[in-house]
């Protein structure tokens, strides 16, 4: 689907449900509400959905938003590579997605039509291309949503997926009234006392394996209970292991309420995070990917450690 075809599609349909992925980050939330505002400007009825409440840290993107009640006609997924990322509460939409807009190289092409670019820095950057190339209007809130997704998925423009296009888009978006400095402070600098307590706990228990080439942290249900902080404070820890000086691959294991563990993997340019996670049925980007593995802590840690050893030929 080309951008012109996408615009024609959006103009000829209505009653949109925009699906964002579970454990929502700045890119999926930014993409969802950027598209919601684009559709609103077209005079369309739409709502953004997630299997869990949207994190409060992104409330500046959906201030004043309320989901209207209507019978869904058109389903769009944003920043989602696989229907499993809908979450159980939204699996009723599986097999019904009309359009998927995504930037993951591991996209499963589950939608009837797909716009995907694995080299794009963020899904919001694809939406920015869309509005620019089709002449659709951009207002301050659309610009803020797009900028937030772009900034968060590039780590404030320091990750390897930061491209010249990403910098140019960011510069153009900064011309709008988006208070980019405050966005970046909220996304990257501000931490609650609970969050600082969580980070101290996981750093204390970090493992350094294979001569330090692998750094691993584990967030168990027991740790969550012992710290006594909001479970939401345990989201977004994946970048911590790679802070270790010698680390090539950083792994975050987070115990799931249903059992098993969610893995978040980050790598340097010497390893492929997506390829690593595909061994366990997951995927993502070359430098950032994830998966879920069933089993006890010992079983999952053993399987992951074995895979890391094979990665390093040890």
Image (spheres, helix red, strand yellow):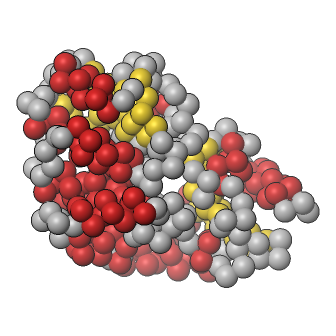
- Image-quadrant location for residue 71: top left
Q: Is residue 236 above or below residue 2?
A: below
Identity of the residue drawn at 39% across and 26% down: 1
Q: Is residue 256 above or below residue 313?
A: above
Image check: 46 left or right of 295?
left
- In this view, the residue in front, 71 or 78, is 78
Q: Position of residue 133 (x, y in %)?
A: 26, 41
Depth check: give the residue in front, 134 or 65: 134
Q: Residue at x 80, y 53 (%)?
A: 307
Residue 111 position by quadrant: top left
Residue pictured at 20% horizontal, 56% vertical: 143
Residue 86 appears at what percent x and percent y? 44, 35
Relative to the observer, which residue lies in front, 20 or 222?
Answer: 20
Visible in this render: residue 236?
no
- The residue lying toward the viewer, choosing from 139 and 221, is 139
Image side of residue 201 versus residue 11, left or right:
right
Q: Is residue 249 above or below residue 98?
A: below
Q: How many marks?
A: 0
Residue extending farthest to the right is: 314
- Whole-percent x and y of residue 286? 62, 54
Please name the residue shown 34% across and 49% down the image.
124
Occupied quadrant, residue 268: bottom right
Expressed as whole percent of the image width and height from the top left, the position of residue 251 reads: 65, 62
**Quadrant where the image shows the C terminus:** bottom right
Tell me if 288 is positioned left or right of 146 in this view: right
């Amino acid at each position: 689907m080309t951008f012109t075809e996408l615009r024609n599609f959006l103009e000829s349909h209505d009653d949109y449900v925009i699906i964002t992925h579970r454990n929502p980050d700045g890119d999926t939330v930014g993409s969802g509400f950027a598209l919601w505002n684009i559709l609103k400007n077209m005079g369309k009825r739409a709502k953004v959905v997630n299997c869990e409440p949207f994190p409060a840290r992104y409330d500046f993107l959906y201030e004043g938003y309320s989901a209207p009640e209507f019978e869904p006609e058109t389903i769009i997924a944003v920043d989602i590579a696989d229907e499993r990322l809908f979450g159980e509460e939204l699996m009723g939409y599986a097999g019904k997605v009309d359009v998927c807009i995504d930037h993951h190289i591991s996209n499963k092409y589950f939608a009837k039509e797909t716009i995907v670019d694995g080299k794009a820095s963020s899904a919001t950057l694809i939406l920015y291309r869309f509005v620019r190339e089709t002449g659709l209007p951009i207002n301050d809130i659309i610009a803020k949503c797009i900028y937030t997704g772009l900034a968060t998925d590039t780590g404030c423009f320091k990750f390897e997926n930061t491209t010249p296009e990403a910098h140019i888009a960011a510069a153009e978006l900064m011309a709008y009234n988006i208070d980019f400095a405050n966005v970046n402070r909220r996304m990257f600098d501000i931490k609650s006392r609970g969050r600082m307590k969580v980070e101290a706990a996981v750093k204390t228990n970090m493992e350094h394996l294979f001569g330090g080439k692998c750094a691993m942290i584990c967030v168990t249900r027991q740790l969550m209970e012992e710290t006594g902080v909001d479970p939401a404070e345990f989201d977004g820890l994946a970048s911590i292991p790679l802070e270790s000086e010698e680390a090539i691959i950083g792994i975050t294991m987070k115990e799931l309420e249903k059992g098993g563990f969610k893995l978040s993997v980050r790598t340097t340019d010497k390893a492929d995070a997506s390829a690593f996670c595909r061994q366990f049925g997951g995927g993502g980007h070359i430098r950032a990917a994830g998966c879920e593995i069933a089993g006890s802590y010992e079983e999952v840690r053993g399987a992951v450690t074995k895979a890391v050893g094979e990665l390093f030929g040890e």
